[in-house]
Image (spheres, coloured by chain):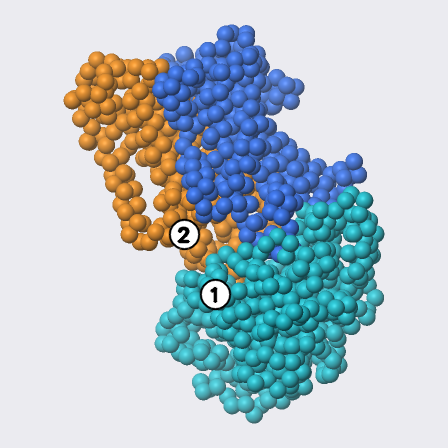
Chain colours: A orange, B blue, C cyan
Amino acid sequence: MSGGIPTAPMSPTAPTAPTGGIGTGGGSGTSRTGPRAAYAWWGLCATGLLLILLGPELAPHGPTATPGPPYRPPAAGAPLGTDHLGRDVLSMVLHGGRPLLLTGLLAVGIGSVFGASAGLLTALAGARSRLPRMLLMRPLDALAAVPPVLLVLLILTALPGRVGLITAIALAGTPLSARVAYAAAEQVVGRAHVEAAIARGESRCRLLGREVLPLVAGALLADAGIRFTGAVYLVAAAGFLGVGGSSDADWGRLIVEALPGASLQPLALLAPVLAVALVAVTVNLAADSAGHRSRKVLA
Amino acid sequence: MTLLAGPVGRRLALRVATGGALLAVLSLLVFVGVDLLPGDPVTARLGPNATPERVAELRAARGLDEPVLTRYAQWLGGLLRGDPGTSFSGKPVSEMLADRVGHSALLAGLCVLLLVPVSLAAGLYAARRPGKPADRTVSTGALLLVSVPEFVIASGLVLLFAVGLGLLPAVSLIPAGDHPIRHPDMLVMPVLSLLLVASAYSIRVIRACAVSVLAGPRVEFLRLTGVRERTILRTAVVPAVLPVAVQVWLVTGVGLVGGAVLVERVFAYPGVGDLLVTAVLGGDLPVVQAIVMILGAAMLLALVLADLAVVLLTPRLRTGGAV
Amino acid sequence: MTADSSTFLTAEGLRLETADGPVLDGVDLSLTRGESLAVVGSSGSGKTTLALALLGHLRDGIRHTGGRVRVRGADILPHAPAGVRGSLIGYVGQDPGAALNPYARIRTTLLTAAGRLPRGERDTTVRRLLERVGLPGDTAFARRYPHQLSGGQQQRVVLAAALARDPAVLILDEPTTALDPPAKAGVLRELGALRERGIGMVWISHDLIAVGAFADRVIVLDGGRIAEEGPARRVLTAPRSAAGRRLVAAGTRSTARHTRTPPASGRAGAPTAVTAPDTGAPLHGANPPDTAAGSDSGKTDGPVLRASGLVARHGSTTVLHGVDLAVEDGECLAVLGVSGVGKSTLARCLTGLHPAAAGTVALRGTPLAPDVRGRDRRERAAVGLVAQNPAEALHPRQDVRTALVRPLKRLCGITDRAELDRRVRDLLESVHLPPGFAGRLPGELSGGQRQRVALARALAARPSVLICDEATSALDTVAQEGVLALLAELRARTGLAVLLITHDARVARDASDRLLVLADGRVAATGPTPVLLPPGDSPEEQVTRLLTAPAGAVRPTPYDTDRGASLV
């Protein structure tokens, strides 16, 4: 509907992925395996989240400390061994998670709020008013044509550091959030109760807040979850490329630094690789199941 | 050729026009929008202790003291003539990109070439056995892979094939002036890691589409008429899946270049990745802007092609039965 | 159920179950060659499941737990051996639009159904099959795609595909339900011709009267069991089972509905005898709420609502091309048309939800702004709207009271809590819902109840005219009649003018005083309902006649064997 872009994804961490609901692991399997499995699954997620957030406090060594010689295999003081600088791999991994999650969360919060506002306002303005589409949706469509990694790099060139990274990731998620919000709201706006509210002359604020938002909130949250998957990917990628003001222990950075010595100390590579993969998969599964649930609300 | 004069031609013309308009908007965002961002690449690089004279000098050297719209007009004029400007290092951007863009495109192209048969076969295979172990393996695998960054998968592959098994080189050391196509062993892992991630999404889309077609009334009618499953797959399922799949393949193909930047760094492959990172760290905007515009144009072109493919593959649209 | 030599298809004690319980429970039937059998039942009786089981097909989630289905003595459940479907038994389903492969030309569809053929025989086979079902056999037609055919033509293609391998029996699952009246007649004609030629048929239908004419024997299915079985004539005239009597009664009612007097045929003024509401004040109607319902002098002469030259567009497509209409006080004007002619757009133009591109809407002679946002509070209150889909009528997270209170506050300016409560109670009462419903959420209401709440919401601001956009079409027959009766009662009591938008000629005939037939965004015919749809013939046929009569209303296309189908 809006421009020449089909709603296909721009990145592997994509929007509105159809799944069919079979074999999607713990996420959508919750309905099949009963509430106990669901609790166990959410409990596991919460524990993981807590572990990542408290990681820096739990780490035995600081992110710059070098408790041993480089490339030492696992030993008493360093259960996963040391990396090329002699830093404790376990401590580094524990230090790296918190900035990853918090940066991603902040960026997604900003991007989703912007995107959802643009999408909702456009949908509410109706199909016949072109102005909001021209001013809001078209620029976002243009932005969506750039692969997110490149958009992040472009913005980091002009605006280096954490601020640039957060701005960039927020911007990368905005177009898709806007489209999801627009699509969800468009369905709701045509419902008879919303039309009845328009026909009795309710204000735009009330229309949006009382009639539309409660019905699309689920879809918006599910979308924010998918956006968060993308954000985790982008933060890790920025760390991996060494841009965006990454901290010493950034998981992406740990991976790139461990690559040359991978044959000497495979654990220094394996640990951050598994950490990123686990977080990405967990976030994706959670977003997937949230998406399934939000689609049931209006059915 | 009568096709192009009819509804398809009109639709194509409209799409090309829309694509062009979007590209214009994109150029504005990439140049003027970036300029309007808070902060300043020059002061950010020089640090807080730089003297105002030093900042002004550098700004002048980079041509940043002119009004943004003037610079935009010059840049856009250059782009239209095929000249993406000059790097802050003084070298023409086109020269810097020359080989590297081709190398990156080679990775993405090879990957798309493999992506089409792999995702179609796996998607249809899973869809024909919904809920069975084979389907659950494919679907779960795809769901897990779809969210993992390519460079993480690439690193995993290095651990497995180079460190663990010692089968393949861990880095793509291609001699200067040589073309990567002459070193297929060095292409295996970069292409495989891109393929794993890219095909995960395509498989999910194709499987979901095929499952819904297979469960629909059309296939039921064909089965009730006694048509064989192979014929059903060929005449009813594949034609219904293709319009969706082609879109995903094309868009994924362009998106792959983004992923390629990361994978290249894992294998030290000589694509645009290194160049980009250097440019980002040095605040060398012209280089990054040029690459973003090239890929943006490629993506918009892919979308036009995808749209054309959908029209050509859907009889209702092709014959102008509906807009 | 003796399996004598002439028996072709049998079911013996067939039992099929879902996770929720049995769908079919001990069904026996047999069909001899050339026989025509009708299986009739209301929705949920398991008749489609039975139809598919007779082809050896079980839909997902259905398990075969007992009994057998045999064709010429060979079992086809749980798996039909190759060479049964298509070759021995053919299948025609309800919706040809959904059944035909949109990516295949007609020729391909027929050849796929025919199985392997030598190259040289293909053209003649396609031609023979098409001509057999009364379609043109030329190459140009065979090269068409399904979307280039009318609904009736599509169903003929399905029939041709089912006949491609000369089966001895056809399973027909409601083969004409999705078709419009002319196409239905055409397909029935072809099926009648096939029956003459000795093809056995199993007709699956909910309409006993309609299929009775084609059947030798009738089986009445009820809740997955056979309620009764017998010769068609006997079951039609003297059904023995309760289910059979219900089906006969339903069929008779739908064909004879027109003979009843319309529920409220009087103009405002006629039904003055109806008791005033308990609350004293009239619930709806005139803005000066002084007089009781009836002919009154407070109303200016002229219609409550008049539209002249309405033009509406969706993007670049023009949906309405200059529509004129007027609704008088207390009158019910029905707007009748098939789907896609712009009925809903008309409703939205009148309410200002879809601003008209040209033309005017006037309320008691005063022109209204095209966009609802430009209309003042009194004007917004005067036009009420009830929309089609009860599932979307109400906010799923707001209770009934909230839905009713909002228009009272917004349009009537009532803020006093006690007064609001009283009005909500009155509104619920006026649509025959108990006061306790005020606290309920839409999810706790049935479709009919939701539509009543939507009606109450539209009535809350005491509109002068109520626009009902297919307000009953998503409801089942009982709920539909309830809502229509309620509308008639409200009109009688309050003199409310109603614009009833519908695709259902029976609803229009039963409920309206005047009729306006819309075709292709233009007024095709208008006049008093009893004149346009006189009692007697079936209203569908009368409407077809109305639509085909005025020149230009219908565009005949080549190959259009089903006249009027191009309207759909």
Relative depth, front residue between C205 and C230 = C230
In three-dimensional space, the C-alpha distance between marks 2 and 1, rounded to whole angstroms, equals 37 Å
- Do the numbered discs 2 and 1 sit on residues whose CB atoms are within 8 Å? no
Compared to B235, does A154 lie above or below? above
The single residue placed furthest to the left in the displayed view is: A76
Q: Chain of mark 2?
A: A
Residue pictured at 70% horizontal, 77% vertical: C213
- Number of marks in the image? 2
Compared to B38, does C109 lie above or below? below
The x, y position of residue B297, in whole percent, is 59, 28
Compared to B173, does C291 lie above or below? below
The x, y position of residue A272, in whole percent, is 32, 26
The single residue placed furthest to the top in the displayed view is: B176
Relative depth, front residue between A116 and B28 = A116
Crowd class of label 2 (few under 14; some 14 to 19; many from 20; radius 10 Å): some
Question: Which residue is disc 1 drawn over?
Answer: C66
Is there any visible trace of residue A144 in the rendered image?
no
Amino acid type at image mark 2: Arg
At mark 2, the secondary structure is helix
